[in-house]
Image (spheres, grey):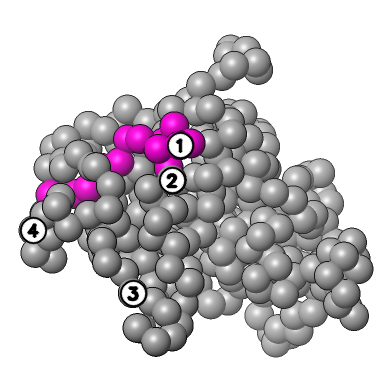
């Protein structure tokens, strides 16, 4: 089965990102396919390269980057939601005259069309939110 | 297996939150607008405080209210994007003392059984 995943909340604030990660990991372990993981609303904050969580707890951002690398996952951050919340890649930073970018490895910024496409192309789109 | 070209799925957007006080309503609407270009079979459902999103007379400017952009007229623009299937939950409306006359756009009122039936028919359910 092909799954699309939507993450609507930021790291640590809500359970959504943890649940999405565990679900995604298990889907892959069971031999299914992840078409795309799309981050919307505060979910875009899961892509921040600047998080420094306590050492004795899970590193949510890194976990996503590592899983993406291991399974060649497509982690997409919504451009509109990202702009609102100050999540920028180098391109976006330059375009808007900002002096820094902060996207972690394995994530890419793109449009909402990628979410709709995930809904169309996947057998199931699973939403993780509050 | 379905062919890639011309796949049309039933997309349902579930809205349960008030229009202001959080960003879920606005950003949900943004997905609907972008999604319209993909020509899918789209329905919008408003439940709980989500019914307030469609209420007439929203006053949000600095002088009249909370100093936030009023995006309510965007719901009227949906028709122009071929998004016309809007449903509200009967009990949610009644609990809030609202009738369809209080709303900006034409909607169909569904009771719980009808809402369940509608949801069962969907291929993709997006909830914000």
Circle nearer the N terminus (3, 4): 3
- Residue ID at (43%, 68%): B70
Label 1 marks which chain's residue? B
Q: Which residue is mark 3?
A: B59
Q: Quadrant of residue B71?
A: bottom left
From the viewer's perspective, tell me whether residue A65 is left or right of residue A23.
right
Q: Nearer the viewer, mark 3 or mark 4?
A: 3
Q: Nearer the viewer, residue B83 or A130?
A: B83
Residue A46 picture location, percent across and down: 67, 67
Looking at the image, residue B11 lies above or below residue A20 = above
Q: Classify mark 4: helix, strand or loop.
A: helix
Q: Are marks 2 and 1 in contact (CB under 8 Å)?
A: yes
Chain part drawn in magenta: B78-90
Q: Classify mark 3: helix, strand or loop.
A: loop
Q: Tell me, yes or no, whether the highlighted magenta stretch contains residue B73.
A: no
Circle nearer the N terminus (2, 3): 3
The local crowd at label 4, few if under 14, some if 14 to 19, many if 20 or more residues have their Cα within 10 Å, is few
Quadrant for the C terminus of chain A in the image: bottom left
Circle nearer the N terminus (1, 4): 1
Label 3 and label 4 in one chain? yes
Q: Which residue is mark 2?
A: B77
């Amino acid at each position: 089965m092909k799954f699309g995943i939507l993450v609507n909340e930021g790291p640590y604030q809500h359970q959504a990102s943890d649940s999405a990660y565990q679900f995604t990991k298990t889907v892959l372990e069971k031999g299914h396919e992840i078409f795309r993981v799309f981050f919307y609303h505060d979910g875009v904050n899961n892509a921040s390269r600047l998080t420094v969580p306590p050492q004795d707890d899970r590193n949510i951002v890194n976990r996503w980057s590592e899983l993406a690398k291991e399974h060649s996952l497509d982690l997409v951050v919504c451009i509109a939601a990202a702009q609102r919340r100050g999540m920028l890649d180098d391109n976006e930073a330059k375009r808007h005259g900002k002096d820094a970018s902060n996207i972690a490895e394995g994530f890419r910024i793109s449009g909402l069309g990628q979410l709709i496409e995930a809904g169309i192309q996947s057998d199931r789109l699973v939403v993780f939110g509050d | 297996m379905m062919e890639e070209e011309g796949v049309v799925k039933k997309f349902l957007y579930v809205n349960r939150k008030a229009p202001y006080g959080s960003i879920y309503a606005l950003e949900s609407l943004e997905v609907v607008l972008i999604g319209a270009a993909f020509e899918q079979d789209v329905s919008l459902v408003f439940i709980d405080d989500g019914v307030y999103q469609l209420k007439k007379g929203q006053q949000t400017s600095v002088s009249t209210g909370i100093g936030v952009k009023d995006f309510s007229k965007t719901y009227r623009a949906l028709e122009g994007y071929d998004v016309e299937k809007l449903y509200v939950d009967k009990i949610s409306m009644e609990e809030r003392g609202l009738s369809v006359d209080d709303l900006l756009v034409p909607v169909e009122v569904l009771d719980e059984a009808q809402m369940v039936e509608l949801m069962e028919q969907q291929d993709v359910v997006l909830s914000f």
